[in-house]
Image: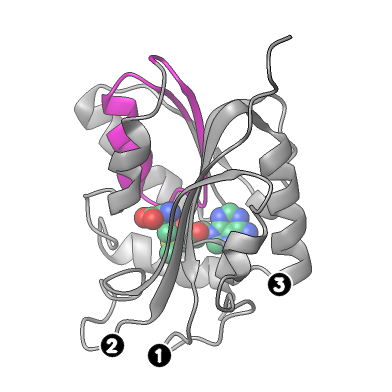
Amino acid sequence: MALKDFFNQRYQQSNNIFGTEPIDIVAKAAKLLPKNAKVIELGVGEGRNALYLARRGHSVLGIDNAAAAIENLRNSLKKENLKMETIVTDASQYRFKQKFDLIIATGLLHFLPPDVGNSLIARIKKATKDGGLNLIATLASDHPRRKMPHIYKNQELKRLYQDWEIIIYEEVAGHFHGMAINPQFQPPKVAKLLARKPAPLKP
Ligand SMILES: C[S@@+](CC[C@H](N)C(=O)[O-])C[C@H]1O[C@@H](n2cnc3c(N)ncnc32)[C@H](O)[C@@H]1O
């Protein structure tokens, strides 16, 4: 089954399949954001991270290629009377039209072949404002059920940000994507990164 169909089916079967709490480093990133920050989440799913930031007054754009994810997210936005731009599209092909204070991709990059993911990371970095943040979480060891196109190697994600300030980098086994789908899975390892783009020195 194609990945998009798989996710559409899961999102139609039940709500909040990855929970309602943002992943831990999102709360840490939120403390570093300016007021009314511009944020984009690629592979936003049902929006646990994006909603957390929209509730805090940030201007969030959420993108996912599973229409059912965006439908569930729009329902949550209505319930909470929150505003957020949402688009159903392939994040790997997305052309950034503006720069962002924070770009998030949690649970997305392991689904993209390495060349596609690396080219997306290069565009994400470019589309980040000077002094802005990137927040990425991706699988760094095998998933018990799905063969992923890209399992990040030890330190691989960190190396892609060697020209940025690394605020958080960890490779940890823990509850992440897939756990909510089937709690008996052994937790795979996840690489989590929060990094800041250097701001040029003022003359
Ligand atoms: C594991 S979920 C994570 C959702 C959300 N980021 C979170 O942490 O709750 C991965 C999401 O990425 C989406 N996705 C996978 N490949 C995608 C692509 N090429 N373009 C856009 N979204 C994609 C899936 O539909 C799914 O909603």
Q: Residue at x 41, y 18 (%)?
A: 34
Give the quarter of the figure containing the C terminus.
top right
On-image quarter of the N terminus: bottom right
Which residue is the site of mark 2? 185
Q: Nearer the viewer, residue 115 or 28?
A: 28
Amino acid type assigned to the residue bearing label 3 in the image: Pro
Q: Quadrant of residue 92?
A: bottom right
Stretch of the chain drawn in magenta? 35-60
What mark, if any, has residue 188 been given in the picture?
none
Dot placed on the residue nearer the N-terminal end, 1 or 3: 3
Mark 3 lies on a secondary structure that is: loop
Q: Percent from the top left, x then y, of residue 129?
A: 63, 26
Disc 3: which residue: 113
Left or right: 147, with 54 as reference point:
right
Image coordinates of residue 195 in percent, x first then y, are: 52, 45
The residue under label 1 is 144
**As drawn, is 2 to the left or to the right of 135?**
right
